[in-house]
Amino acid sequence: MASSLLRLPSLLAPAPALLCRGGRRLYAAPSAAVARLSAAATSTGASAAAPAQAEGARGGDREGQVTPRSADFNAWYTDVIAAAELADYGPVRGTMVIRPYGYAIWEAIQDYLNVKFKETGHSNMYFPQFIPYSFIEKEASHVEGFSPELALVTIGGGKELEEKLVVRPTSETIVNHMFTKWIQSYRDLPLMINQWANVTRWEMRTKPFIRTLEFLWQEGHTAHATLEEAEEEAMQMIDVYTKFSYEEAAIPVIPGRKSKVETFAGANRTYTIEAMMGDRKALQAGTSHNLGQNFSRAFETQFMDENGQLEHVWQTSWAISTRFVGGIIMTHGDDAGLMLPPRIAPIQVVIVPIWKKGDEKGVVMEAVASVQNTLKEAGIRVKVDDSELRTPGWKFNHYEMKGVPIRIEIGPRDVKNRSVVISRRDVPGKQGKEFGVSMEPSIMVDHIKGRLEEIQASLLQKAITFRDSNIVDVSSYGELKEAIAEGKWARGPWSASDADELKVKEETSATIRCFPFEQPEGTKKCFMTGNPADEVAIFAKSY
Amino acid sequence: MASSLLRLPSLLAPAPALLCRGGRRLYAAPSAAVARLSAAATSTGASAAAPAQAEGARGGDREGQVTPRSADFNAWYTDVIAAAELADYGPVRGTMVIRPYGYAIWEAIQDYLNVKFKETGHSNMYFPQFIPYSFIEKEASHVEGFSPELALVTIGGGKELEEKLVVRPTSETIVNHMFTKWIQSYRDLPLMINQWANVTRWEMRTKPFIRTLEFLWQEGHTAHATLEEAEEEAMQMIDVYTKFSYEEAAIPVIPGRKSKVETFAGANRTYTIEAMMGDRKALQAGTSHNLGQNFSRAFETQFMDENGQLEHVWQTSWAISTRFVGGIIMTHGDDAGLMLPPRIAPIQVVIVPIWKKGDEKGVVMEAVASVQNTLKEAGIRVKVDDSELRTPGWKFNHYEMKGVPIRIEIGPRDVKNRSVVISRRDVPGKQGKEFGVSMEPSIMVDHIKGRLEEIQASLLQKAITFRDSNIVDVSSYGELKEAIAEGKWARGPWSASDADELKVKEETSATIRCFPFEQPEGTKKCFMTGNPADEVAIFAKSY
């Protein structure tokens, strides 16, 4: 599976010049920008609807300001979600309203994956969300895994229902019920579908985007004639997710296989992509399951093979959800707010016009419109904020909070010089500013496109550096405990029992995130038992 | 509102040559194609999963065949849905599984509307589907309209809930709850959003696509500072729907205003687009509501205006659903199956290779690949069916059933002549065939694009002719009764009471579909009371 990494040479090798200019800023002190935002934001609807305030946790004088990331990562996270207008709490405990800016990030994820799913032979379709309760009970480990989290409809059209209906927590059961109708012969295979849908899991501890009572996702479901084909499909899809994470979201996930303990309820094997958040906790950002024949046996999904024999189909399922948006926030954000990788940023460039005297407005706005058109025609997602209700300073902070990769300022002097001022979101202060960038369309478009690519590469490189400096190779349980206590990930050879795995969880709160596909060479000895081990596992605390 | 019609000159005036060649075929006798399909379809998964059979209504010997449209319109409809693999029944009564081909039509609808919504200033977002029961009760007419149709979640995470949760039947209540948090000042207005979502209504009599327990839709919600702005918005969106219907779906809907009796539960005014189906029943295909201040008063959604006065916002909501797919089937389909307007057809051109001897295969497939690439590069949605499990004859019928607008046949003789054979789905038999169409890329692309446009225009023109020949102008209640008894729509001046309207419904089963925006000139006398009337209304039986 190193192949997914090898395909990304341009992103893994960012321009050397860039690395000198940028530098890490993950734990920077609260910027002056935030303080200024605080003063100006009083009248925005956004701040009044902040989750922090909906909970009554923070007072009025800090409206719009975010807690420094280094001071309290969790408070920072919910503050950013409020201040960048990504989401809000719904009226029912644990539910979330995804606001337009947060939803636009989800749409960028959808736009990319939807094309990849179709390219790899899948069709979209839609299954009902109400599942007869009896379906859930058919696959033994599935019911065990999901029954504590179910929402049940018991009344419909004013009447008590004869059979309770489950609001889908995932669709394997209803998918298999339908597949059983549609599949007769090997000629009907492979059957490869996907749906974009909402799902409901009655979670007790919730967190916006990361774990909510209802969330949005895509769920792929496939049926194949052989185990080998199903395994290839499950691997293909975790590879699609890995590529997306690196190339689009600039998140250097580690793809691998889940331990038996952590495998999906109903799967033979679960593949996962694990991402390191800014607080070094792990986030399971996507999964792909080889379901074997578990569901096809439970639902009698059979086909006639080429020799006229009836066989159960081999299946996969795979999913990425709105949780990924939380992963983007917690990977790239800093004290000034969100920081979006250009490829999935709803706004890649924001233009802020600057003028004082009335007679300056005309020429500035004319230049702004011209630059906007030039960039738009070049396929760059550009927004002009020409509101006269806000100062340029307020706007600077607002779009930093929203993580817009590049800001362009245009004032009367710039117009005279036929040039603009450019600021990079990922490089703070003067270092991130460029003066006198020519307005000449071909020069400016090349310049902006180049900078967007540099930012994309830089975000990924920073995240890789951060990740790699926080993974410790361990060869004893003591070393693991030490690494986990420091908040790091521990990687070491593992061939111990499920009971040992649960002991580690109890004693350290860390779980096996995955057996990574990329394994070190050489013979290995289990750090827990001293027995020979085939693979290293990665342990970490997780969301 | 005639403006929406005036914008479509090219579609309303199809090439005269075309009209001579095509001709109506809406009530044609069952074609030989269907009989042939029947014989070949036995082994497809599709036929076994046919709704008709799921209900046990039809036997095995007619597998894959559709009931003639003229014999039984309702049976024809469900047969086509099964045979064209558009949808299937879900396991819970009244639910529907939307299969890939049906979903692809919905995606075409989404792709068009999503762009138009954004162009008109709306952002997508997502609201939770679980609504506290108390919300539904806040707006008096809303609760009256929706409470009989609610699905209620009463158990979550294994526990009885303190407050029952409504699975959204529509989102006005939860939207207003959130708008109240986000809107403080006139500067926060207008607030214009949309969501693509599933909704649940506990319907007793269901029909695939047309009325299902759960369906997919988009629901737009906006808040404005003035009544005038809200009214303008409601009209703008019904205009977007009208334009979509004419230009993309080739359905000549009649836009107009609903009567008070038929207005949405919670709206001041409901605008609608009404479509005439092939059996001449009306289908409400989209609606746009001016909600006035009904929900803003119920939820205290207020803003500070420019003079510092607190005011309730003025609102709209508007929706189109997967019901529209049913409208497309019932407008254009014929005895051979579905007939799709090219602009929303998932497959615009299907290429069927024809060869007998093994040595012919190579040259034919090479030409097929070349034609496929040429069309694909020209932006035409093209599919090659090179399966060797099916005969060309089976494929002809299969893609006719699926309503693919154009079929291209390529055999050894065609390859020799550097030409192809083209068949139009909308013109049956030899009349719809063209031989010797050059394979030369630029000639072929122009030819195919031209034919697709002709088909698009022809489908619309046929539907307009059909509609207009089935609307009767009436000037007495007797005339209305006669028209309705003949299965037609009745149009006549109306200023009578709600009680009279309900009497018409009881006695004739017809309801006021709308007061059309396009009104005849001159003074009018109500056909029921003889009193002066400002407008004509359209009465019809409906789905």
Image (cartoon, coloured by chain):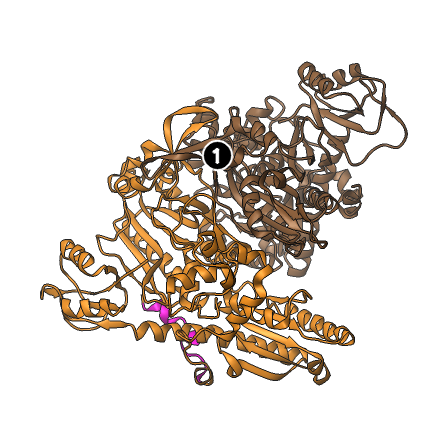
Chain colours: A orange, B brown
Comparing B129 with B493, the one in front is B129
Q: Which residues are magenta?
A: A2-16
Callout 1, which amino acid? Tyr
A502 to the left or right of A380: left
Name the residue carrying label 1.
B133
Q: Secondary structure at mark 1?
A: helix
B12 is higher (above) or lower (below) than A36: above
Name the residue: 44% across, 32% down.
Answer: B152
Predominant secondary structure in magenta? helix
Picture coordinates of residue A474, whole percent (x, y): 18, 71
Picture coordinates of residue B396, whole percent (x, y): 55, 40
Picture coordinates of residue A38, whole percent (x, y): 53, 66
Residue A535 visible, this orientation: yes
Snapshot quadrant of residue A493: bottom left
Comparing B172 with B383, the one in front is B172
Mark 1 packing: few (<14 Cα in 10 Å), some, or many (20+)?
some
